[in-house]
Amino acid sequence: MKSIPFVLAGLVAGLLLASPGVASPMKATVTIRHQLRGCHTWAVNGGAFRRAQHMRLARGGTVTFVNNDMMGQKLVQRAGPAVRYVGRPNMNHPAASVKVRFTRAGVYRFTTRPGEDYMKDMKTIGEDNVLTLKVVVG
């Protein structure tokens, strides 16, 4: 009788170890927007807009970057294995986008280089945000 709790605990542990983990997604969308404080931010898959983001992605997956900011944004890779761009990383018109394919596992880091405002006299409060994105591909 005393061994029943140990047997149950062993069964539960076995089920937990045998169950598959949450798989990383094969695709994602990152949207850049204009805002009054900090000038611009970005969001992953419709989540919260922030200056710094991080995400996981499956090997072979893609991220589509969409620029809905009031200025052009050039996507710049800062670290990680080389990526494959489908389109141009210089998103220099409204609603411009670029798709990035991640063929190798690793940690990738991106930022943007803002261009000129499409609309003159756009006011913002405070220093402009420096956008950063960390992508972990496994």
Image: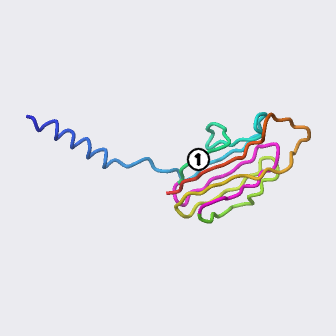
Compared across the picture, whether 23 is left or right of 37 comes to left
x and y, in percent, of residue 101 in the image: 61, 60
Crowding at mark 1 (Cα within 10 Å: few <14, some 14-19, many 20+)? few
| Left or right: 80, with 113 as reference point | left
Bounds of the magenta span?
58-80
| Closer-to-camera residue (70/50) | 50
Q: Residue furthest front?
A: 127
The answer to whether residue 124 is above or below residue 109 is above
Residue 77, placed above or below residue 116: below
Vertically, is 104 above or below 56?
below
Of residues 87 and 55, the one drawn nearer to the viewer in this rendering: 55
The picture places residue 58, in percent across and down from the top left corner, at 51, 55
Q: Which residue is mark 1?
A: 54
**What residue is drawn where x is 54% and y is 64%?**
104
Residue positioned 26% across, 44% down in the render: 13
The percent coordinates of residue 128 (x first, y second) are: 77, 42
Q: Amino acid at mark 1?
A: His
Out of 11 and 27, give the one closest to the viewer.
11
- Give the quadrant of residue 7: top left
- Is 100 a magenta residue? no
* Image location (x, y in percent) of residue 72: 81, 50
